[in-house]
Image (spheres, rainbow, N blue to C red):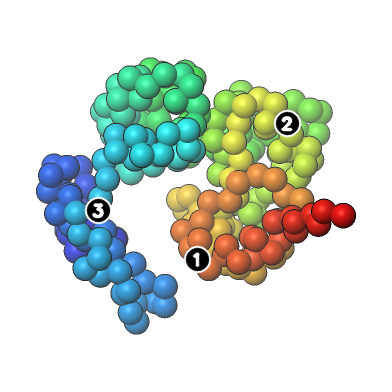
Amino acid sequence: LDCRTEGKGETRNHSMAELKTLDVGYGYTADGGKIFPFRGKGIGMMPSLDEVLAHFPARRFNINVKSNDPGEGEKLAARLAMLSPNERFYLSVYGGDKPIAAVKAALPDMHTLSRASLTQCILRYAALGWSGYVPDACRKGTLLIPVNIAKWMWGWPNRFLDRMQGVDSRVYLLGPYTGGDFSQGLDDPELIKQLPNGYSGGISTDALDLVMPDIKERFTQPAQSTP
């Protein structure tokens, strides 16, 4: 809770009623902490998963399980099982190996991602992708590919993206991988400028306000005039 609110501790240790008393705008800053423009403006605005899905039907969401507790994966799977397959189609779940394994076991049709599955996909595809082979770990999932690793994916970008689409997997670029856990989002406008022309995959960013101008400049087609 300390990341974005004035609260303390882990989300799992608080009820939804308690979470809704917090200010979700408290921790936002775009200048390294000089100003916090949304403090006091986000009190009571933390939505539940049910509220998000009800308000944004047929929109894509990546659900991040923050722990490595398989029980949390089981609880999430039980909730997602209440949705229709068509509703689940728009959702992806990623996080710790154990909860993601629990989600996948309960709901084989879910698009999922864990560190283990991503590592297997990247290493096996980098070794064998030249042949057209797509490893099982790359199929029907969500792939968060660090921008400095993407070049090792055979056929990058277009053939790789086409192959992943062909096995019902979704590709998102992250910031550079420098070791340790998952990379951060693709938050540097300079990296957006370096993306391949015509890139048609996704971008995962924590700084949409910073990178959106460059995304629009690079990838938005100008309107065609009518003669």
Residue 178 visible, this orientation: no
> Marks 3/1: CA distance?
20 Å
Residue depicted at x 36% and y 35%: 53
Residue 96 vertical position relative to residue 197 in the rendered view, above or below:
above
Image quadrant in which you'd find residue 212: bottom right
**Which residue type carries mark 1?**
Asp
Q: Which mark is residue 163?
A: 2
Mark 3, residue position = 45
| 172 versus 112 height, above or below | below
Which image quarter is the C terminus in? bottom right
| Three-letter amino acid code at the position of disc 3 | Met
Which-is-in-front pick, marks 2 and 3? 3
Would residue 221 appear left or right of 26 to someone viewing this image? right
Q: In screen coordinates, is 122 left or right of 81?
A: right
User: Local crowd at mark 1 within 10 Å, few (<14), some, or many (≥20)?
Assistant: few
Q: Residue at x 29, y 38 (%)?
A: 51
Residue under label 1, please give it. Answer: 209
Q: Residues within 10 Å of mark 3 (few under 14, many from 20)?
A: some
Q: Secondary structure at mark 3?
A: loop
Rendered-image quadrant of the N terminus: bottom left
Task: Work out whether mark 1 precedes mark 2 in sequence or the reverse, and give the earlier one.
Answer: 2
